[in-house]
Image (cartoon, rainbow, N blue to C red):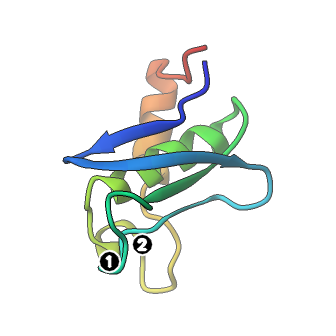
Amino acid sequence: MTVKTHTFNGAKHKIAFCDSIEGVTDNSEKVTDKNREMLILSGEDFRAFHSAFHESLEGSGFCDKCLHDKEGYPMTVDAARFLWRLGYRRVK
């Protein structure tokens, strides 16, 4: 099953998969509901899981400084690793 769209807090995002970057969610004020996009890492490993988890929080409206440290690195790795260890994986 490939997810093509998902609605986060009333805002529909087009979902695209990539192989080269960790992920991007555009929530700028210039974005409308018709052109919101989320790019997540493809695959079934932990990096792909973390990408989907992190970008879903961005899509839900969590502020950038809530999700990244001062150097811009994601602070969501520990929470994603916890969910991964509990057995939450991408469902086919």
Which sits in the foreground, 34 or 77?
A: 34
In terms of image quadrants, where is residue 8?
top left
Callout 1: 10 Å neighbours few (<14), some, many (20+)? Answer: few
Q: Return the residue at label 2.
A: 68
Tell me which amino acid carries mark 1.
Answer: Lys
Q: Reply above or below: 63 against 90.
A: below
Which residue shows up at 29% across the image and 69% down it?
Answer: 66
Q: Reply above or below: 33 against 41.
A: below
Which residue shows up at 49% across the image and 18% down it?
Answer: 87
Q: Reply above or below: 53 against 85.
A: below
Position of 38 compared to 46: left or right? left
Residue 34 % position (x, y)? 38, 57
Which residue shows up at 45% across the image and 52% down it?
Answer: 54
Which sits in the foreground, 28 or 92?
A: 28
Q: Are marks 1 and 2 in contact (CB under 8 Å)?
A: yes
Q: Return the residue at label 1.
A: 65
- What secondary structure is marked by label 2? loop
Q: Residue furthest top?
A: 92
Q: Reply above or below: 37 against 63.
A: above
**Total of numbered circles in the picture?**
2
In 3D space, how far apart are the residues under numbered discs 1 and 2 (Cα atoms)? 5 Å
Position of 68 compared to 17: left or right? left
Q: Quadrant of the N terminus?
A: top right
- What secondary structure is marked by label 1? helix
